[in-house]
Amino acid sequence: MISATNYISALQELLENIKVHQVEAIQQAGILVANALETGGIVQAFGSGHSHMVAEEAFYRAGGIVPVNPILDPRLLFLDGALESTIAERQSGYAHEILQREEVSSKDVAILISNSGRNAVSIEMALELRSKGLKLIAITNVNQSRHSASRHASGKRLFELVDIVIDNCAPMGDAVLPLPGQYSKQHIGPTSTVACAAIINSVMIEAASEMLRRQLPVPIFPSANVDTSDEGALKKLLERYSDRIRYFRHEGQ
């Protein structure tokens, strides 16, 4: 049976599974983020395909941590076409090209999001950032990744290359509801974006909790769309990190 209520129930079950089985990894990831921010680093967030939305979810977000840099690329964002995105995420050497536009420091921490964890761009991004001295956090579908062959020359999957692995607990193939009758081999209702968005926000919450425990300032974005918002204060928040996060810079900077 497929319906909106069945889908939402399946998502609730998925999120409960994450709460029960992934909370320790989420807490450990939060500590890595807090460590980076305490020493002057930022969060580098990267995902290709639909996973780029998770990197963007953590960026410039009301109620989110300020020093988050989404590593975005037009080819991977579907801006040059859907099939071009698939080609780009499988292209060897492309992660190196993407990183030439970014300001990356060994003080930073990286959150890499990939449901399959098998494509070259995510694996090479992990290898490139690890070579620069960053601690790495992966949000991925561990079961699906274990049952998939790597598309990178190393033969590695993303979960094999990072310091902390957070399983999004999504089903094989992402979609959760089987179709009936002649369509029974197909499923509908993707889950990984909802799961990964909940996870990355949970990591940021754990990071904020750890920073408060250390009596450190926690740079949090207020909403810019409520009547009490202060545009001047918002600009000051952006200026503090504009040398590291290019999306915080004014035009012409």
Image (cartoon, grey):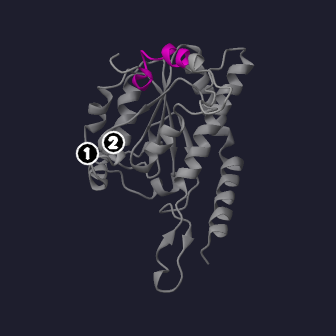
Residue named by callout 1: 91
Viewer-nearest residue: 48 or 118? 48
Circle 2: element type: helix
In the rendered image, the residue lying farthest to the front is 227
Based on the displayed image, in which of its 4 quarters is residue 75 positioned? top left
Label 2 belongs to which residue?
A: 121
Disc 1 on helix, strand or loop? loop
Label pair 2/1, CB-CB below 8 angstroms: yes
- Quadrant occupied by the C terminus: top left
Name the amino acid type tagged 2: Val
For label 1, count other residues whose C-alpha is less than 10 Å away and answer few (under 14), some (14-19) or many (20+): some
Q: In this figure, what is the number of numbered marks? A: 2
In the depicted structure, whether residue 233 falls above or below residue 120 = above
In the displayed structure image, the side of residue 217 where residue 186 appears, left or right? left
Q: Is residue 240 magenta?
A: yes
Which residue is depicted at the point 51% across and 13% down? Answer: 240
Q: Please, which residue is most extreme toward the bottom here? A: 181
Q: Amino acid at mark 1?
A: Gln
